Image (tube, rainbow, N blue to C red):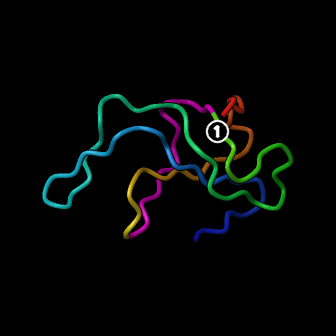
Amino acid sequence: MIKPLKDRVVIKRDGEIKKINGIILPTRDKKGTGEVLAVGIECKELKIGDRVAFGVYAVGEYQPEGFEGEMLILREEEIMAVLDK
């Protein structure tokens, strides 16, 4: 698993991923919500498992080999809200 540095947060974005012949294609309906998978040591308000909202066009996409879904690495300040589960 990834260990984010400082105030970074690793998030699995909600939504469907389209694959054709093993190639991941972006979907038009990107969602600005996801689940926190890991947090850096300087994160004060988020914890693993939190459901969060962030900007739909957030930058910081990362696609580790073998991971199903879309992963983002964002700063804690880029998270707009923690959602109810």
Name the main secondary structure of what is drawn in magenta.
loop
Q: Nearer the viewer, residue 76 or 1?
A: 1
Asked if 16 appears above or below 47 in the picture, the reply is above
Residue 4 falls in image quadrant: bottom right
Image side of residue 75 versus residue 68, left or right: right
Image side of residue 35 versus residue 70, left or right: right
Asked if 4 appears above or below 47 in the picture, the reply is below
Q: Residue at x 41, y 63 (%)?
A: 67
Location of the N terminus (image quadrant): bottom right
Q: Residue at x 83, y 43 (%)?
A: 45
Residue 84 among magenta residues: no
- Percent x, y for residue 68? 38, 58
The amino acid type found where label 1 is placed reads Arg
Q: Which residue is mark 1?
A: 51
Q: How many marks?
A: 1
Image side of residue 45 versus residue 26, left or right: right
- Percent x, y for residue 21? 13, 59
Asked if 81 appears above or below 15 in the picture, the reply is above
- Percent x, y for residue 29? 35, 28
Q: Residue at x 58, y 53 (%)?
A: 73
Q: Which stretch appears magenta?
A: 53-65
- Percent x, y for residue 20? 15, 52
Residue 58 among magenta residues: yes
Badge 1 marks a residue whose secondary structure is: strand
Residue 23 falls in image quadrant: bottom left
